[in-house]
Amino acid sequence: MSGGRTNKIQFARFRAAAEHWIEVFGLFDWDLEFLHEKLENKYASVHYDYATRKASLVLSTSFGKWPITEERIQDSALHEVLHLLLADLSGFAEAAAAERRVTEAEHIIINRIKAALNRAHG
């Protein structure tokens, strides 16, 4: 598929993949909502408040020029759930450090977890 708009079926696949990883990591203490809306320069995003345990996982309605592939949708779901997995750590760390450094460290950890899961599960 070429770039363009994501559809309801792709959103359902994103949600199913995210729900799978939420179950794998035991993130049952979050009040979650799934949204399908336009994001600027992102495939997906997660917005959360770790104090209230409320989170929104969002799949962008547009991937811009990038191809919309099943792999990209699955990877985006995992990536956003990993942000949620690290939400408490990030929240506590941001109180003590510059936010940019915390975000960089969070992405290093996320990429390592994704690589390990890909190796383990093909």
Image (tube, rainbow, N blue to C red):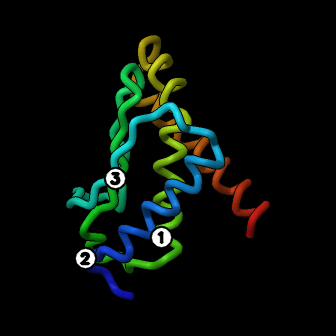
Instruction: Give the labeled residue for mark 3.
Output: 34
Disc 1 to disc 3, C-alpha distance: 17 Å
Residue matched to label 2:
5
Three-letter code, disc 1: Arg
Sequence-first disc among 1 and 3 = 3
Q: Is residue 60 above or below residue 56?
A: below
Distance (Cα) linking label 1 and label 2 = 14 Å
Q: Secondary structure at mark 2?
A: loop
- Closest to the observer, 35 or 108: 35
Image depth: mark 3 or mark 2 in front: 3
Vertical comparison of 40 with 61: above or below: above
Tell whether label 2 touches label 1 (CB within 8 Å).
no
Q: Residue at x 53, y 73 (%)?
A: 71
Quarter of the image with the C terminus in it:
bottom right
Image position, residue 39 (x, y; %) = 24, 57
Residue identifier under label 1: 72
Q: Amino acid at mark 3?
A: Phe
Residue drawn at x 45%, y 34% is: 30
Q: Earlier in the sequence, mark 3 or mark 2?
A: 2
Q: Position of residue 108 (x, y in %)?
A: 59, 42
Which class describes the residues within 10 Å of circle 2: few (<14), some (14-19), or many (20+)?
Answer: some
Give the left or right position of residue 26, taking residue 97 as reference: right
Label 1 SS: helix
Q: Earlier in the sequence, mark 1 or mark 2?
A: 2
